[in-house]
Structures are given as C-alpha cells and as structure tokens.
Amino acid sequence: YFYTPEVFVARKDWPNDEQDFSPEGLAGKGIAVPRATSTEYYLEDNYQDARILIYDTFVDCMAALESKRADLVFFDEASVAEELNFKPHNAKIVSEPIDAPNNEGFAIGVALGNEQLLGRLQSALDKFRGTQGFLDLFDKYFGSSRRPYALVKGVRPPTYREHRKR
C-alpha cells in the first residue's frame, strides 16, 4: 500500500491563514469532495456542520473551488500535489496533512492465496523504491523532488505555513 494523508485546498486568496480545520472550525464552510471516496466518508462522519459538496471527480471539485461554488476541497495529498504541480490553478494547500483513520491508500490487487505473486511484487517494489528509476517515475507523475509538493520518501512536504510564504 501507498498511503498519503488528506489535505484541505483553498483558492490562493484564502483570507484566513490561521483557520481552524477542526469540524467546529469549518462549520458552515462548503467543502468539495469526490463522490464515493474515503475522503467523502470521513467528512460525512466528522464534519456534519460543514456543507459537504459532493462532485463526481476531483477535477470537478477543483473547478467548484475556482468558481467559488466551494470554499475548500478535501482530498489526498498525492492527487493534490499532482494537480497543483502540473496544471495551472489559483489554489494552494492550506492545512496540515490529516491522517484520516479510514484512509484506504493505494494498492495492487492480487488474487487471494497467491502468496508467490504477492511476495514477488513486494520484493520488486521494495527494491525499486530505492532506485533512481523510482524517483524518475515519481517525478513524472507527482512532480520533481525539487517541486514544492514532493512526496518522495524522506522529503517532507512543506507545511501550509511554509507553502504560504512562497
């Protein structure tokens, strides 16, 4: 599994640098989230006083944010990083990463009982993670390790306060 925490995203003109991102702090805010995702379920379970705006895709959520139909977007940091690194958006990460307890992560499916294939895949992934090839592949899809939202193991993404200063 590859786990990535969730983050809140706002337009670059987000007025509140000291926003409280707790359920109480976001009461009444419109938060866009993709349909049928762990992020949707997390918001529904924990942010009942927010206006949860459910869209078909993450891209639709970002469009809602930019058109001011939503105050925030809530989604996984890796997807947000890819979107912000490679597409022009008037948006930024405004929260610290949140490790939602129902985070499903990303995985490769293997037929139940196929321990040989599972072992081979895990071994190959473990070896690949430590190579330049992994960094090249990561950079291709998530942005260079020199970009502001790099998620390469050992490279900490900036906090929202650090990013805000850019």
Image: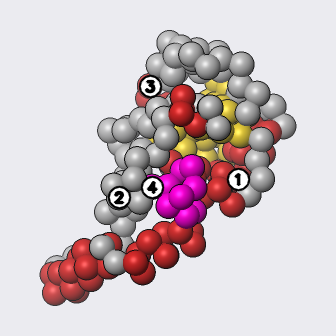
Q: What's the residue type where badge 3 is placed? A: Asn
Q: Position of residue 59 (x, y in %)?
A: 70, 53
State the extent of the magenta-drawn residues as a range.
142-151
Q: Is residue 52 left or right of residue 119?
A: right
Label 1 sits on what residue type? Val
Element type at marker 4? loop
In the displayed structure image, the side of residue 19 where residue 53 appears, left or right: right
In this view, 128 is above or below 93: below
Q: CA distance from mark 2 to mark 4?
A: 6 Å
Estimate how packed mark 4 is, as few (under 14), some (14 to 19) or many (20 or more) residues with alpha carbons within 10 Å.
many
Distance of label 1 from label 4 (alpha carbons): 20 Å
Which badge, 3 or 1, is on the more N-terminal residue? 3
**Tag 3, which secondary structure?**
helix
Crowding around mark 3 (Cα neighbors within 10 Å: few <14, some 14 to 19, many 20+) is: few
Q: CA distance from mark 4 to mark 3?
A: 26 Å
| For marks 3 and 2 on the same chain, the one whose residue lies earlier in the sequence | 3
Point out the tag, 2 or 1, that comes first from the N-terminus: 1
Comes first in the chain, label 1 or label 4: 1
Disc sitting over residue 151 in the figure: 4
Camera-near label (1 vs 4) is: 4
Q: Is residue 164 left or right of residue 76?
A: right
